[in-house]
Every structure is written in structure tokens, then in C-alpha cells.
Image (cartoon, rainbow, N blue to C red):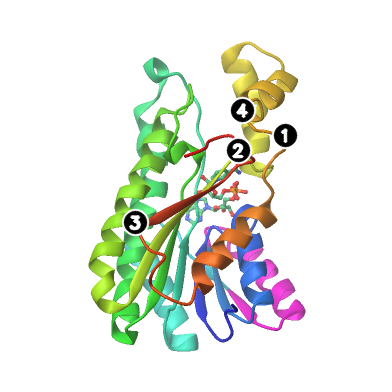
Amino acid sequence: MNLNGKICIVTGAARGIGAEIAKRYVQSGAKVAIADLALESAEKTAADLTRMGPGEAIGVAMNVTDEAAVNGGVQAVVDTWGGVDVLVSNAGIQIVHELQDFPYDDWKKLLSIHLNGAFLTTKACLPYMYKAGSGTVILMGSVHSKEASPLKAAYVTAKHGLLGLARVIAKEGAAHGVRANVICPGFVKTPLVEKQIPEQARELGISEEEVVNRIMLGGTVDKEFTTVEDVAEIAHLFAAFPTNALTGQSIIVSHGWFME
Ligand code: NAD
């Protein structure tokens, strides 16, 4: 299975999990648009990946919560390469607070990036996929699509919501050869998680070591972080799967933290 010549958009891919997915796709022969708020880093990541090959990458400025920016970014990809075969809606943030102290602005910001971002990017890509009669939408969920944790009301709500969105995309998209799936990673040591370690320690009144060993890795079968490479491999499987049998599903990659 490879992605030879496939045109892919990965949001939030200037760094972290998204950057590794973009790398895996370029290694598999894809043309990858790295769509991120941070255009300079997106362009740098794209240049590094293009040097590596055999596929190629470009950086695209995109705030996934801004409809005009999303439509403009997707249009730029279509103008460059002629269509969109794969969308990975990956851009995301984390904000932790106890529910009774959760600032409404933080709640709205988080939901907007995860849910409005997935909705707007999917809506912008579907017409091109429908026209081609094929396509794949991959939404970046989390173990928190299936499980709850204290301090994460907004994140857990958003990540659960993405499962519903993917299932609707799968049902509506089937007639057009479009499938949709969700990746549900456990904790991966990216800037998003590094930032949370001191924040959770402060909110919960425990040490940073305890946050890592008990809160983040306590439920895994081997006390190991999931890696960006692990997640990218699932993203590759969903994108390159040869038939439409694999749709409306979610795969948990979390060292057994959550099992179903
Ligand atoms: P990260 O902070 O390393 O990277 C996130 C990227 O998203 C950054 O490049 C940032 O510029 C971009 N971004 C943020 N807001 C944006 C916006 N409005 N528009 C466009 N781009 C925007 O995070 P990560 O850990 O790589 O997380 C990526 C995804 O994986 C997120 O959806 C996150 O919820 C999910 N996830 C992460 C983990 C983990 O442990 N790191 C676990 C499960 C799921």
C-alpha cells in the first residue's frame, strides 16, 4: 500500500504528530500540503520533506477556524496539484481547567479549533473528493474520544464529537467513494503534552513526575508514551487502505491505555 501521487492536506502539520504524518505520506510518494497557522514553520517542514522525497510538500497558511482561510488554503492546493485525495484534520490544542473554573472563552476556543476546524476543512475538501468519486477524511481524535479525564472537559467533549462527525462523513460520503475514520492516540510527547505536564501538576497539586507516571502512563500496559511514528503509521493505513471497507471506524493507538 502506498500513496504514490495522492494529494493530501494535513492541518496542524508544521510540527508534532501532523509533521510526522506529512513525513510518512511524503515517504510513501504523496504530495502533501502542510496547512498550519505557523506558515514559516510549515514552509520549513515542507522544504525538508521535499528534499527527502520521493513525494513532495508545500506549506499553506491556514487558520482552521476561519472559513475564508480554510477555503482559500484548500483552493491553493487544488490550484497547485489539481484536487484533494486525503484530508487529515489534525490541528488541535489543549487547555486544562477544572470545570467550575473553565473560562468560557477557553471552552469556545478549544471547541472551535477541534470541531469547527474539522467541519470547515472537511466541507471545503468534499466537493473535490465527490467530483473525483473517491477520497479519505481522517480526523485526529484521542483516547479522550472514548474516555474522560479530569480537567479536560472541553477536549473530551470535542474529541468525542469527532467520532460522530466521522460517522456522518462516512455515511454521506459512501455514495461518492469517500471514507472517513478517526485516529485515537494515547499520550504522545509533543509540545502539546510537554506544556500540560507542569499545568496538570499545578492544577492537581502533585509532582510533574506523578503527572507522567500516574496520570499519563499509569493506565498503559508498559508505561510507554505512544510515538509520533506510531500515529503516523495508522494515518498511513487509513489513507492508503485499498477499498472502502474501512470506514466510519476509529483505531486506538495507546499502549493499551484504553481497550475496546
Ligand atoms: P502540537 O501542539 O505539537 O501541534 C499542533 C499544531 O497545530 C501546531 O503546528 C499548531 O501551529 C497547529 N494549530 C493550532 N491551532 C491551529 C489553527 N487554528 N489552525 C491551524 N493550525 C493550528 O500538537 P500535537 O500533539 O501534534 O497534536 C496534534 C493533534 O493530535 C491534536 O488534534 C491533538 O489533540 C491530537 N492528539 C495529541 C495527543 C498527544 O498526546 N500529543 C494525543 C492524542 C491526540
Q: Position of residue 52 (x, y in %)?
A: 76, 77
Camera-side mark, 4 or 3: 4
Respond yes or no on whether mark 1 lies under 8 Å from ligand 1. Answer: no
Q: Are marks 2 and 4 in contact (CB under 8 Å)?
A: yes
* Magenta region, main secondary structure: helix
> How far apart are labels 2 and 4 at the CA level?
8 Å
Q: Position of residue 215 (x, y in %)?
A: 62, 24
Point out which mark residue 219 bears.
4
Query: Image quadrant of residue 109?
Result: top left
Point out which mark residue 120 bears.
none
Q: Which residue is identified by label 1?
A: 222
The residues colored magenta run 36-58
Looking at numbered disc 2 in the image, what kind of residue is underneath it?
Gly
Q: Position of residue 228 (x, y in %)?
A: 67, 53
Q: Which residue is identified by label 2?
A: 256
Q: Under tag 2, what secondary structure? A: loop
Q: Are marks 4 and 3 in contact (CB under 8 Å)?
A: no
Decide which of tag 2 and tag 3 comes sooner along the chain: 3
Q: Are marks 1 and 4 in contact (CB under 8 Å)?
A: no
Q: Is residue 180 left or right of residue 212?
A: left
Camera-side mark, 2 or 3: 2
Respond yes or no on whether mark 4 lies under 8 Å from ligand 1. Answer: no
Camera-side mark, 3 or 1: 1
Whether residue 195 is in magenta: the answer is no
Q: Under tag 1, what secondary structure? A: loop
> How far apart are labels 4 and 3 at the CA level?
27 Å
> How dense is the environment of label 3, judged by Cα within 10 Å: few (below 14), some, or many (20 and up)?
many
Examine the rendering and report whether any part of residue 65 can be seen. no
Relative height, residue 176 to residue 144 (above, below): below
> How far apart are labels 1 and 4 at the CA level?
9 Å
Query: Image quadrant of residue 207?
Result: top right
Decide which of tag 2 and tag 1 comes sooner along the chain: 1
